[in-house]
Amino acid sequence: MSCRQQQNTITLSDTVSDKIEADSSLVKKNTRAHVIVPYNVKVKDYLNFIDSVCAQIPILSDNKLGSYILVHYNPWLIDSLRNLDYYFQKAKGKFQYDLNIEIILQKGDSLFIPDSLSANAIANQLLSSRIDVNIPEYQLRVIQQTDTVLNFKVRVGQNSKEYMEALGDTLNQRTPIGNGKIINVIKAPVFINFKTGERYVETRRDDGYYTRMPLIPSLEPVINGLRYGKMFHATTNLMTLGKAYSNGCIGMREADAWSLYYYAPIGTPLKIRYDLIIINNKKEKMKLRDIYHLYDQPKQEILR
């Protein structure tokens, strides 16, 4: 791939699937350098398209956070991805069986390209991100320096152990407590029923309708030195949020999963804690329910 940059003009010569051809009409001069989207981009092709744009712009291709920088410089993109949430769309009276074929970028849309100062500022903000999860609070926060930039309800693992046929082993379904970091992003996650080994292609929503599984990136952490696979991911059932419901994963609504992806790149530090005493929004001290019964069991059980 090649790139030519002259003042505020950037010309793309090649992209994913060879769909963008060399064409001076794709990029126009303006007060800020920008790329004109040459065709409608569906959700299923969106991440590859963004990567293809970044690959041809040195200030982005030379930075491992290039795609994150581009999207944060065009923050309407995150809003658009969040608005594709099934339940947001359903509230507007729209049902879509396959959200992956929805158009996220329209032909003619502009993607502005940051200068070096803006790119560095965004990168530094992202590098300051850390994830904080409090299990009995069912709450996930992303903190940058001293500011909480994301704060939303999640579901956590059940307080049980169960034999899973697909694993050939007994699975402790509690969400692990400890420190770690994000080590991998699964851009096209596959979900398996641990009890049967079957792949989920469809999902049953809270309203009883079935839809295709959404293509939203999942995050893989290492916690206390152990890898846990795609532990942070979207759930299609909002009724499970604020509950101990999963097989150990931390699930969130689709809109929040897109936000987490763009605020927690690989390398983001992570703390999963189990604090029963918290300060609520009214600055009052509250005691949460001991959902894993950690403090009414013998000490040796607590440490397992």
Image (cartoon, helix red, strand yellow):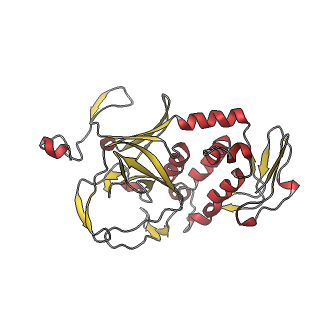
The answer to whether 220 appears left or right of 77 in the picture is left
Report the quarter where the N terminus lies.
bottom right
Toward the top, the furthest residue is: 283
Q: Provide residue 287's location: percent of width, then percent of height.
A: 25, 34
* Foreground of the two, 45 or 15: 15
* Foreground of the two, 49 or 87: 49
* Foreground of the two, 166 or 283: 166
Toward the left, the furthest residue is: 298
Q: Provide residue 61's location: percent of width, then percent of height.
A: 68, 48
The answer to whether 53 appears left or right of 200 in the picture is right
The answer to whether 297 appears left or right of 291 in the picture is left
Residue 274, quarter of picture? top left
Residue 282, quarter of picture? top left
Q: Provide residue 14's location: percent of width, then percent of height.
A: 77, 60
Count of residue discs: 0
* 216 shown above or below 202: above
* 176 shown above or below 119: below
Residue at 35 percent across and 31 percent down: it is: 280
Residue at 61 percent across and 37 percent down: it is: 123
* Foreground of the two, 78 or 72: 72
Residue at 47 percent across and 65 percent down: it is: 190
Q: Provide residue 120's location: percent of width, then percent of height.
A: 65, 34
* 75 shown above or below 87: above
